[in-house]
Amino acid sequence: MGFVVWIMVGLAVWHFTIFLPDRFWGGIVGACLGAMLGAIVLGWLAGGLSVPNNDELTVATALVAIPGSLLGIAAVWMVGVRQEQDRPA
């Protein structure tokens, strides 16, 4: 169940990318995937390399996914900006 929480938090944070210029690698879909994968990876690492079940879910399970999704979005953004700079004018 923790996996679903991490995905939903990543999806919720991804909605705020509409306020940023679309420079993401893969466009808005790339930003969505980056947010969800970042949330999953950081949540999994913070959970001791395990996914919490229903009995182990806390508010911290959801909160730990927020920085992960932001890091995922930032990574996809940086790759997109770098590709944009590498393109000939």
Image (cartoon, grey):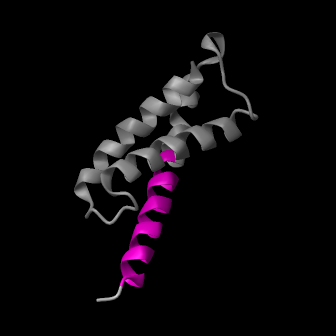
Residue lying farthest to the top in this orientation:
55
Majority SS type along the magenta span: helix
Measured from the top left, where is residue 21 in percent x and y? 25, 64
The number of numbered badges drawn on the structure is: 0
**Residue at x 70%, y 33% (from the top left corner):** 47
Q: Between 58 and 68, which is closer to the camera in this rendering? A: 68
Asked if residue 84 lies in the magenta stretch, the reply is yes
Asked if residue 20 lies in the magenta stretch, the reply is no
Measured from the top left, where is residue 40 in percent x and y? 57, 38
Lateral position of residue 54 relative to residue 5, left or right: right
**Residue at x 35%, y 48% (from the top left corner):** 29
Measured from the top left, where is residue 75 in percent x and y? 50, 61
Lateral position of residue 32 relative to residue 45, left or right: left
Residue lying farthest to the bottom in this orientation:
89
State the extent of the magenta-drawn residues as a range. 69-87
- Quadrant containing the C terminus is bottom left
- Quadrant containing the N terminus is top right
**Residue at x 70%, y 40% (from the top left corner):** 45
Above-or-below relation of 10 to 71: above
